[in-house]
């Protein structure tokens, strides 16, 4: 477990390490002290492929981050993990992700494009915040879109749903 207690980006990039003191890292968490840490220098967040779990609130309120790269082996994104990363314009959820916590992607007014390629899409976007993205791409690995999944996404202009989606829940896009 890598516990973030302060943010120290290099040239604006917060690149998480593969290991710490010679031991591999597979989970990212945020310490209580980091909730008041200055995140103004964080412009990009890069989560390497060795990370499998992003805990609740891990990158909450990284206000000025404009790019998030999620590694290809992440299986769990916790509640509010990227909430209030206000400058992010695009996000890609890889097919390795099996679980996304409530409000994981919320309060991001600059978010315009979301691409999802995980098995099941739940109502993990909102928590009462309206989402403003215009492009939604639902990838080949998605089979189920749960009820209310995109209920507060009122600005979708371009929607691409793969032919592999076999179930769309009630009010998924209302």
Image (cartoon, helix red, strand yellow):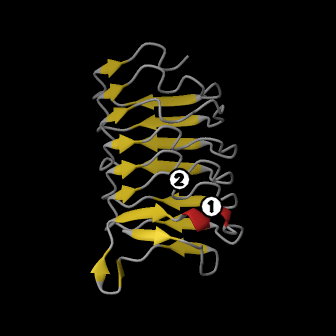
Q: Position of residue 119 (x, y in %)?
A: 30, 37
For the point 64% across and 69% down, which residue is it?
A: 42
User: In this orientation, does residue 24 appear?
Assistant: yes
Tags 2 and 1 touching, CB below 8 Å:
yes
Q: Position of residue 90 (x, y in %)?
A: 56, 50
The answer to whether residue 98 is left or right of residue 155 is left
What residue did someone put label 1 on?
35
Rendered image: mark on residue 14:
none
Quadrant position of the C terminus in the picture: top right
Judge whether 9 appears above or below 147 on screen.
Answer: below
- The kind of secondary structure element at disc 2 is loop
Q: Position of residue 117 (x, y in %)?
A: 36, 42
In this view of the protein, which residue sits in the foreground, 81 or 71?
A: 81
Judge whether 9 appears above or below 78 on screen.
Answer: below
For the point 35% across and 86% down, which residue is it?
A: 21
Q: Disc 2 to disc 1, how far (Cα)?
A: 9 Å
In this view of the protein, which residue sits in the foreground, 162 or 169?
A: 169
Rendered image: mark on residue 57:
2
Classed neighbour count for the residue bearing mark 1: other residues with Cα under 10 Å, few (<14), some (14–19), many (≥20): some
For the point 65% across and 45% down, which residue is it?
A: 108
């Amino acid at each position: 477990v890598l516990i973030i207690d302060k943010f120290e980006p290099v040239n604006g990039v917060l690149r998480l390490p593969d290991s710490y003191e010679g031991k591999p890292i597979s989970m990212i968490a945020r310490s209580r002290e980091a909730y008041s840490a200055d995140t103004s220098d964080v412009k990009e967040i890069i989560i390497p492929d060795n990370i499998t779990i992003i805990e609740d609130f891990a990158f909450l309120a990284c206000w000025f981050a404009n790019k998030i790269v999620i590694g290809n082996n992440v299986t769990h994104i916790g509640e509010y993990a990227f909430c209030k990363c206000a400058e992010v314009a695009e996000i890609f959820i890889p097919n390795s992700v099996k679980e996304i916590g409530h409000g994981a992607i919320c309060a991001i007014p600059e978010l315009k494009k979301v691409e999802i390629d995980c098995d099941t899409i739940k109502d993990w976007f909102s928590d009462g915040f309206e989402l403003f993205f215009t492009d939604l791409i639902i990838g080949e690995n998605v089979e189920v879109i749960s009820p209310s999944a995109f209920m507060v996404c009122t600005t979708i202009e371009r929607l691409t749903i793969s032919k592999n989606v076999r179930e769309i829940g009630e009010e998924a896009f209302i």
